[in-house]
Image: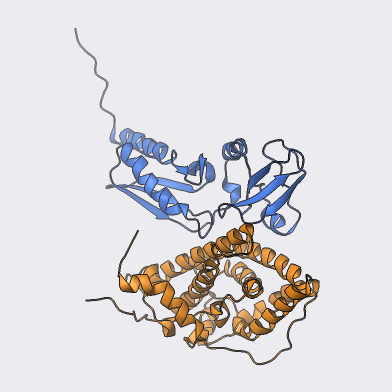
Chain colours: A orange, B blue
Amino acid sequence: MAPGPIRVAETPLVSYLLRRADDALVLGHRLSEWAGRAPTMEEDMALANMGLDLLGQARMLYAHAGEVEGRGRDEDAFAYWRDERGYRNLLLVEQPNGDFAVTIVRQFLYAAYAEPYWRAMMASGDATLAAVGAKAEKEMAYHVRHCAEWVVRLGDGTAESRARAAAALTELWPFTGELFEVDGTDRTLIAAGIAVDPQTLREPWQRTVIQVLAEATLEAPPAGFMRRGGRSGRHSEHLGHLLAEMQHLQRSNPGAAW
Amino acid sequence: MTVRRSPPPTPAAASSARLTAARRAAATVVDPEIPVLTIADLGVLRDVRLGDERVEVDITPTYSGCPAMNMIALELEVALARAGFAAVKVNTILAPAWTTDWMSEEGRRKLRDYGIAPPRRGAGRRALFGVEEVACPRCGSEDTAEIAAFGSTSCKSLWRCRACREPFDAFKCH
């Protein structure tokens, strides 16, 4: 039988793990699209390194999802054999790279959230999530620091860099509401001591964002309409294109390996 | 003339000798990206056990995306096969999470001799957000500056020494 898209039995914990793994995989893939194209050699390596951190986090989370689901699926099954509607990532992380400012602002907005998120998850009742958290919070701290330096340099730079940083912020801001969304899956796991309540992350996220934007002489866009849907598989048009590229080789040559 | 023969080793002694041999073989495996450091120096090698059928080795990743883990698992199988252990199972364990504090003093010295500034002990978050002081591995000066936070591998950043003017890699605190 030819392999086809898989149907995942989405218990709360499996869904939760896939959401976090998908965030990391999709954002890591976006960063990998920069390889060989970044403005400087150092930045090329930085973007690739950050992408690698995220890919590593995704692999550990998918592997754990496979164990919890108990159907013998490995990380590749989740990455390559789910269609767009099966992906549970935030809309923010699937947005296209745009120019360098868009990539940096997207990474900054995500990392400023992911760092306190993973630090809080070190106390998770799920031992694997806690262990992933212990590694990821340090990695995300490096991402925050690196991206914050760039946000300041771009915002407080030339008229051109400032205009691009401001445009990136305006474009990506409507995707930040989803970071703090809570649904039934979250509530079940928060009650079980496995998940952190994302509402508690809003304050540390805002503190980092406001502080860095102030230094960059940029202003946070006013509160307004927030886009949502990624956690339930309703994505922007960009994810399908990303998956087409990422999954093409495995779908054309199932099981291909190096 | 009678020849006195030493008694055959007891099963417990034989098992202990086999375990020592397995540990020694596993500890010879080096990090493919920093070939002067063994996985024991790095703190990546967590445990070696003898089962009924096979040797079990526990390793722990340094960084989430460390691409050397697959290579290290393969090298472990080879090293143990050479030492006479045909059946090997390598487990990757995540908890407790590896930190640069697990690197041995011997490992830090080897790293410095190789030209890579070793991570500071217990630096953790201070190093991430405070002022990081990194001594040049060539001349020892602390008059150094970071060139790039993300270096040639996930675990390194790129620095330069203002005293001897040489660029160098530094192992990042984690």
Q: Residue at x 44, y 40 (%)?
A: B27
Judged left or right of residue B173, residue B19 is: left
In x, y percent, where is residue B99? Answer: 58, 52
Q: Foreground: A67 or A222? A: A222
The answer, for residue A207, to whether it is visible in the render is no
Which quadrant holds residue A179?
bottom right
Relative height, residue B131 to residue A164 (above, below):
above
Q: Residue at x 31, y 34 (%)?
A: B14
* Outermost residue toward the left in this view: B1
* Outermost residue toward the bottom in this view: A225
In x, y percent, where is residue A206? Answer: 72, 78
Judged left or right of residue A85, residue A118 is: right
Q: Residue at x 48, y 81 (%)?
A: A239
Instruction: Give the quadrant of the N terminus of chain B.
Output: top left
Relative height, residue A86 to residue A107 (above, below):
below
In x, y percent, where is residue B152? Answer: 57, 52
